[in-house]
Image (spheres, helix red, strand yellow):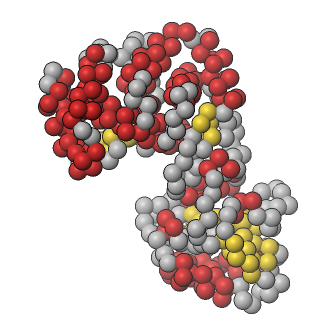
């Protein structure tokens, strides 16, 4: 019996769930990230298998959850590398292996995502009949096929990872997110990137590797931090496949507050960033502040004394910034940074 639906595959009450994976041990986006958050032990076994070159196209890697529903996680390789696209031949050989795996474990019900579609780049109209045909000879098997297009609410994603310890860096970061929330503005990933950028520039060792990016300074490893905190201290990070709105959980606020009470000296950095961003609490304002700061401190220190030069550097960044940021707005951002001594090499507060 085959059923089609949209929604959250991880909530489906079936004996086995199929997870789409690559062969290099990364579950960094989409449904694979959802599985990583919900079934951390499956990820550990999968990563170990990838390191041993045991996860290959056309072969299933199945783990047991120790539960009745789901009893098994079947990791289905749809990509050779996470950077690449899915290949139709890997889906075809994988489906044959999936049917064999279902028979081997005597599985009675199964939920399958749209294999190779979405981040994989394949056409669902081509993949759907392939899945249907593969299970046509197993009429007693309940197959729930999840089709593309369902919108998964980010703060509904299941998280079963171990709660991380609170640290000074995490406490300051969470407290800064909380402060930013107070005026009622949305917390987008652009804004969170810039808040962390300025906290690090203020002297807090967050170990974030910022580079020049489309929307200003960007640190890819901040995603790992957010993923670790999501479901424990913050919510709404999602699976990196859609826009999301993040917020601090009550337990996150409490844990950060309690930790910072023991480290009052760290509040100086928090206050420095808070004073800087006041009046700029929008994605537009935060990107503008961070971009001006970057071009002055990373590209041309002379622009610390020449606002016109700083504006020119921002407009040279890319066409988007040239069209988006008005010179008068950039001037206000430059003046704020200048007045509060953010261009100086000694602007970081020693701690």
> What residue appears at the point 83 percent right and 57 percent down from the top-left corner?
67
Q: Quadrant of residue 127?
A: bottom right
Q: Quadrant of residue 256?
A: top right
At which x and y percent is residue 254?
68, 23
Instruction: Tell me, yes or no, if residue 88 can be seen here.
Output: yes
Classify the position of the C terminus by image quarter. top left
Q: Residue 330 vs residue 54: left or right?
A: left
At which x and y percent is residue 137?
74, 90
Above or below — where is 84 with respect to 269? Answer: below
How many tags in the picture? Answer: 0
Q: Residue 15 vs residue 218: left or right?
A: right
Above or below — where is 98 with respect to 250? Answer: below
At which x and y percent is residue 308?
14, 30
**Residue situated in front as seen by the camera: 50 or 251:** 251
> What residue appears at the point 24 percent right and 47 percent down from the top-left corner?
323
Classify the position of the N terminus by image quarter. bottom right
Q: Residue 16 vs residue 155: left or right?
A: right
Above or below — where is 30 with respect to 283? Answer: below
Above or below — where is 168 with respect to 71? Answer: above
> What residue appears at the point 15 percent right and 21 percent down from the top-left corner?
305
Instruction: Tell me, yes or no, if residue 27 can be seen here.
Output: no
**Residue situated in front as seen by the camera: 348 or 165:** 348
């Amino acid at each position: 019996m085959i059923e089609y639906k949209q929604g959250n595959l991880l909530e489906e009450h079936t004996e086995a769930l199929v997870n789409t994976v690559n062969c290099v041990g990364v579950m960094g986006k989409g449904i694979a990230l959802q599985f990583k958050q919900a079934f951390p032990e499956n990820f550990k076994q999968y990563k170990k298998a990838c390191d041993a070159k045991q996860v290959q196209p056309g072969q299933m890697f199945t783990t047991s959850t120790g539960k009745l529903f789901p009893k098994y996680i079947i990791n289905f390789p749809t990509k050779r590398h996470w950077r690449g696209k899915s290949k139709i031949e890997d889906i075809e050989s994988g489906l044959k292996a999936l049917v064999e795996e279902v028979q081997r474990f005597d599985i009675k019900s199964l939920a399958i995502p749209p294999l190779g579609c979405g981040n994989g780049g394949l056409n669902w109209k081509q993949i759907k009949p392939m899945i249907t045909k593969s299970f046509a000879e197993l009429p007693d098997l309940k197959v729930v096929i999840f089709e593309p297009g369902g919108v998964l609410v980010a703060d509904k994603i299941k998280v079963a990872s171990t709660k991380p310890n609170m640290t000074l860096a995490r406490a300051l970061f969470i407290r800064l997110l909380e402060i930013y929330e107070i005026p009622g503005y949305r917390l987008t990933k652009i804004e969170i990137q810039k808040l962390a950028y300025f906290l690090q520039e203020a002297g807090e060792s967050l170990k974030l590797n910022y580079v020049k990016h489309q929307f200003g300074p960007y640190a890819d490893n901040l995603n790992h931090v957010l993923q670790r905190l999501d479901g424990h201290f913050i919510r709404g990070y999602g699976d990196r496949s859609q826009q999301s709105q993040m917020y601090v959980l009550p337990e996150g606020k409490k844990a950060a507050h309690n930790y910072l009470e023991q480290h009052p000296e760290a509040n100086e950095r928090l206050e420095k960033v808070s004073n800087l961003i006041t009046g700029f609490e929008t994605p537009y304002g935060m990107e503008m502040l961070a971009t001006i700061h970057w071009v002055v401190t990373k590209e041309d220190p002379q622009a610390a004394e020449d606002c016109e030069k700083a504006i020119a550097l921002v407009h040279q960044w890319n066409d988007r910034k040239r069209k988006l940021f008005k010179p008068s707005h950039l001037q206000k951002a430059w003046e704020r940074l200048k007045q509060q001594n953010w261009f100086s090499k000694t602007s970081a507060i020693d701690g």
